[in-house]
Image (spheres, rainbow, N blue to C red):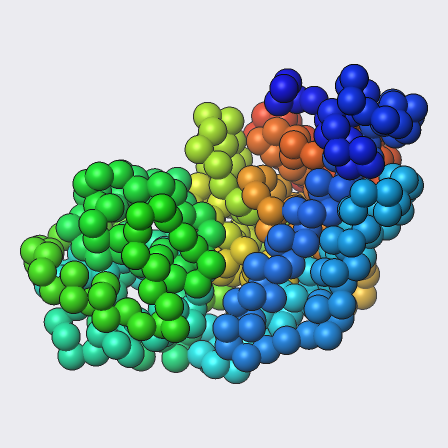
Amino acid sequence: MNENAMFCYQCSQTAGGTGCTIKGVCQKDPELAKLMDNLLFICKGIAAYAYHAGELGYRDPEVDAFLPKALYSTLTNANFDPQRFVGLALEGGEINLKAMQLLKKAHLDKYGEPQPVKVPTGTFPGRGILVTGHSLKALEELLKQTEGKGINIYTHSEMLPAHGYPGLKKYPHLKSNLGKAWYDQKTLFAQYPVGVLATSNCVLLPLDEYKDRIFTSGIAGLPGIPHLKNYDFNPLIEKTLTLPELLSMPGSYELTTGFSDKNILALAAKIVGAVKAGKIRHFFLIGGCDAPLKESSYYREFAQSLPNDTIILTLACGKYRLNDLALGDIEGIPRILDLGQCNDAVVAVNLASALAEAFETDINHLPLTLVLSWMEQKAVAIFWTLLALGIKGIFLGPKPPAWVTPGTFKLLQDSFGVKLIGTPAEDLSQAMAVSAI
């Protein structure tokens, strides 16, 4: 079957194909199947955040009610109306905001308010375990179980923000961050003779070099790899104790993380004053879900091209395109502010809302531009959250999402001003045309 052929959800055949029993509907509404795919991706993103909140004992009845409704709407003959799926997508964006708020509350209640912290990127003497994924609960349990065992714990990719939480930072054997975004796993995990724990999605099939020392937990799973249930990490710990010790090898740079809406808004008066004085001209949110594509070099080039009177907010694994840049500060305000994991997009929303209130305007009239990288399902959910909040003029890339048809993209352009990234120079010129308040 042609991999680009559209699947007809109404008759379970290739749309318009010889087995399609309602060709007229398939041909009349070519966006229908892709919009259903989009809704499924939104549900997957919402489910990810709800799952991690549930690990910490938090649930939201509105989130729980939306998922079955949205999934049910994609069943055979449930709904032939593409416009309704646009409405469901926007509703999904609203529900995803609630899911992100729920998970953020769970993290704050459990681990305290994040604080800015400089995180080393090298290794320390002794044996080690490298943790990847998104589950702070799994990391916490591992830290507890490895206390006093001579094992250092390292974070990878979306686990970097853990270093900013007081309830996790208090463990002295939480040492540093190794590697960058999710797709460097095979090179990184083979490089260091450590135990590896995958706690969520974004885990890749392992190479032979480390398949005997990688373990999964939570929803993560790999064929032939031990899966650890109920946060019992003894098999991982026992394996790690048989591995060679690492040497002290300092990294060539440090990463700063731990910026939350509260500790940034503590600088609100300074930020407002700097904007009014013309010392801060524009804010950029640059981040999202990264991909190993040549075109993704755009995001680092864009950040490097920004004028010195601009501030960058970044989050999710897309931050690794730029979070090692030494861009200095403005009036003591760092020019790069790492807000955390992908679910911490809610922090960016809170910041934008607070700034809009401080300047007595709305988000779309702030000197703020969103330049987002795109990859997987949680990015879809966050994107529709931003649209549901009425945010316009988003730059999106490095290429259109797979579910976007020409008709759907026209809708996004006409209704929300969404645009695909061009060159850093072209996009920067457009963005900076919005004057500071």
Is the residue 209 above or below the residue 221 in the image? above
Q: Can residue 332 be seen from the camera position used here?
A: no
Measured from the top left, where is residue 123 in percent x and y?
18, 56
Number of numbered discs overlaid on the protein picture: 0
In screen coordinates, is 123 left or right of 120?
Answer: left
Q: Is residue 23 left or right of residue 385?
A: right
Residue 200 at what x, y percent from top left? Answer: 45, 57
Question: Viewed as shown, does residue 56 lie left or right of 415?
Answer: left
The residue depicted at 79 percent of the width and 59 percent of the height is 69
**Image side of residue 383 versus residue 123, left or right:** right
Q: Residue at x 78, y 22 (%)?
A: 19
Along the line of sight, the residue nearer the viewer: 102 or 252: 102
Residue 41 appears in view: yes
Residue 372 drawn at (x, y percent): 60, 42
Q: Residue at x 55, y 47 (%)?
A: 288
Quarter location, residue 226: bottom left
The residue at 78%/46% (across/down) is 74
x and y, in percent, of residue 177 in the image: 30, 57
Which quadrant is the C terminus positioned in? bottom right
**Residue 54 or 392: which is nearer the viewer?**
54
Residue 33 in the image: above or below residue 124? above
147 and 37: which is toward the camera:
37
Within the image, what quadrant is residue 34 found in?
top right
Quadrant location of the N terminus in the rendered image: top right
